[in-house]
Image: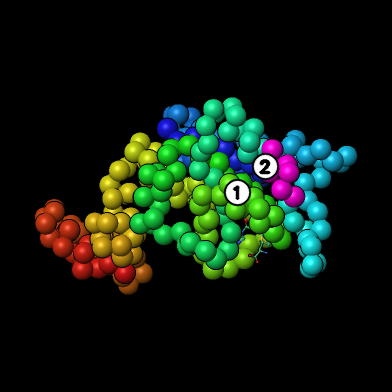
Amino acid sequence: MIKIHIISIFPEAFESYFSSSIIWRAIKNWLMDPVFYKLGDFSDKKFKHVDDNAYGMHGQVISPEPLSWALEWIFSQLWHRVPVVYLTPGWELLQQEKIENYYDTLWWEFIIICWHYEWIDQRIIDLYVTHEVSIWEYVLSSWELSAMVFIDSLVRNIPGVLWNKDSLEEDSFSKKFDRQKEYPVYTRPREFMWLEVPEVLFSGNHKKIEEWKKNNLK
Ligand SMILES: C[S@@+](CC[C@H](N)C(=O)[O-])C[C@H]1O[C@@H](n2cnc3c(N)ncnc32)[C@H](O)[C@@H]1O
């Protein structure tokens, strides 16, 4: 089971995604355990503010204190430190091969920290962050989306999460297909408009079908 501690300003943003389909099944079957922490609960400010003005520039920054208190509180509950993931544009780009290896360095229990404004105070990164991950080279306005992408990509690789383990082995970027994109797939009807399903897929010859798949990677 993978345990993910999620520190967020808006934990409710995860609700609909975590309560449907594959992620929901992973939670229900004890393959994934998400634990939420509302960052505002760790603020000592009057209106539970967690941000402040940036020094030397315009924009809002998550203050170091609430984040640090939240992280230290989780560490104290666990009696030890765990890896801390921070989603950010740029830096290390998320790729299938890396995702398959994250389990070794994330120890099956880690924290994801959320920032929703322009930045997070650099000292939090220096003091706590062990993994900086980007879901690619573009900028989203919220952290929760990138965190959900990261979590989904990680969790679907846990044995038992997907019903059909073949689909994992033969997904795009899988080891089996030299990290290329997967082959075309068809279902009934055999002929649609003027396009026919390739003959070989009806042959029942697994060797030939495997060959066809390899030759038709996109
Ligand atoms: C408006 S963005 C902040 C952008 C930041 N000022 C910059 O230029 O790098 C708000 C949040 O969305 C998340 N985010 C946006 N794009 C992302 C990406 N490509 N990968 C991972 N996280 C991203 C980050 O967590 C960020 O805190």
Q: Main secondary structure of the magenta part?
A: helix
Nearest the eye: 204 or 174? 174
Range shown magenta? 63-69
Which residue type does callout 1 highlight? Leu
Which residue type does callout 2 highlight? Ser
The residue tagged 1 is: 127
Q: Secondary structure at mark 1?
A: helix
The percent position of residue 124, horizontal first and vertical second, equals: 64, 50
The percent position of residue 73, horizontal first and vertical second, equals: 64, 32
The percent position of residue 98, horizontal first and vertical second, equals: 39, 55
Residue at 73% across, 52% down: 62
Q: Secondary structure at mark 2?
A: helix
The residue tagged 2 is: 68
Q: Does the segment drawn in magenta span residue 64?
A: yes
| Quadrant of the displayed image that contains ligand 1 | bottom right
* In the image, residue 180 above or below residue 81: below
**The quarter of the displayed image where residue 71 is located:** top right
Relative side of 43 to 72, left or right: right
The percent position of residue 113, horizontal first and vertical second, equals: 61, 46
Which numbered marker is on residue 99?
Answer: none
Relative side of 56 to 203, left or right: right
Quadrant containing the C terminus in the rendered view: bottom left
Q: Does the segment drawn in magenta span residue 197?
A: no
Q: Is residue 20 visible from the viewing direction of this image? A: no
Question: Does the CB distance between marks 2 and 1 fall below 8 Å?
Answer: yes
Q: Nearer the viewer, mark 2 or mark 1?
A: 1
Residue neighbourhood size for the residue with mark 2, other residues' Cα within 10 Å, grouped as few (<14), some (14–19), many (≥20): some
Residue at 36% across, 50% down: 100
Rounded to the nearest angstrom, the CA distance separating label 2 from label 1 is 9 Å
Q: Is residue 107 visible from the viewing direction of this image? A: yes
Residue at 81% across, 45% down: 49
Q: Earlier in the sequence, mark 2 or mark 1?
A: 2
